[in-house]
C-alpha cells in the first residue's frame, strides 16, 4: 500500500528546485522543440524500417531452415557434386 502523504510537499519541492538551481541544470534543454520532434520522427521512421527489415530477414531464415530440414539442400548438393564429377570427366576427355 502506498503511504498517504502530501503528493508534492512544499518543502521537498523547494529543496528540489534549489538543487536544480545549484547544479546549473538548464530546464529549457529538457523541453522538446521542433527540431527534437523532427529528429524523433526520423528515429521512429528508422526504427520502423529496421523492424520491416528484421521481419524480412526472419522470413528468409525460416524459409532456409525449412528447406534445410526437408533435406532439399542435401539433395541439391548431391546433384551438384554429380554434375561436377561429370564435368571433370568431360574436361579430362577433351584434354586427351
Image: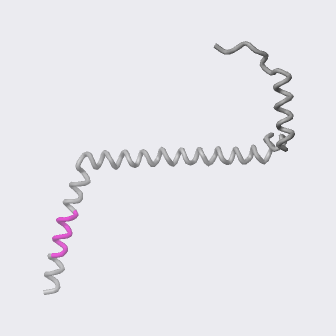
Q: Quadrant of residue 31?
A: top right
Q: Horizontally, is 91 left or right of 37 in the view?
A: left
Q: In the rendered view, does 37 fall on the left or right side of 84?
A: right
Specify the principal SS of the magenta part. helix
**x then y, percent, for residue 87:** 19, 73
- Is-magenta flag for residue 87? yes
| x and y percentages locating residue 6 in the rendered image | 79, 16
Residue 52 x/y as whole percent:
53, 45
At 22% across and 54% down in the image, what residue appears? Answer: 74
In the rendered image, the vertical position of residue 1 relative to residue 54, given as above or below: above
Q: Residue at x 69, y 14 (%)?
A: 3
Which color scheme did the rendering employ for the protein? Answer: one colour
Assign the N terminus to one quadrant of the image: top right
User: Nearest the camera: 23 or 37?
Assistant: 23
Q: Which residues are magenta?
A: 80-88
Q: Quadrant of the C terminus?
A: bottom left
**Residue 52 vertical placement versus 3 (above, below):** below
Residue at image point 18% right, 80% down: 91
The one nearer the camera, 36 or 30, is: 30
Q: Is residue 49 magenta?
A: no
Residue 31 left/right relative to 80: right
- The location of residue 45, given as percent across then percent down, is 64, 46
Label count reads 0
Identify the residue at the far bottom of this view.
Answer: 96
Residue at 35%, 46% in the rendered image: 63
Q: Quadrant of residue 18?
A: top right
Comparing 52 with 39, the one in front is 39
Answer with the quarter of the image where residue 34 lies: top right
Amino acid at each position: 500500500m502506498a503511504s498517504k502523504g502530501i503528493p508534492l510537499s512544499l518543502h521537498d519541492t523547494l529543496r528540489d528546485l534549489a538543487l536544480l538551481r545549484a547544479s546549473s541544470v538548464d530546464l529549457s534543454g529538457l523541453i522538446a522543440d521542433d527540431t527534437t520532434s523532427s529528429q524523433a520522427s526520423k528515429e521512429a521512421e528508422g526504427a520502423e524500417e529496421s523492424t520491416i527489415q528484421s521481419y524480412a530477414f526472419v522470413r528468409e531464415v525460416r524459409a532456409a531452415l525449412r528447406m534445410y530440414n526437408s533435406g532439399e539442400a542435401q539433395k541439391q548438393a548431391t546433384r551438384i557434386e554429380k554434375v561436377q564429377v561429370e564435368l571433370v570427366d568431360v574436361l579430362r576427355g577433351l584434354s586427351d
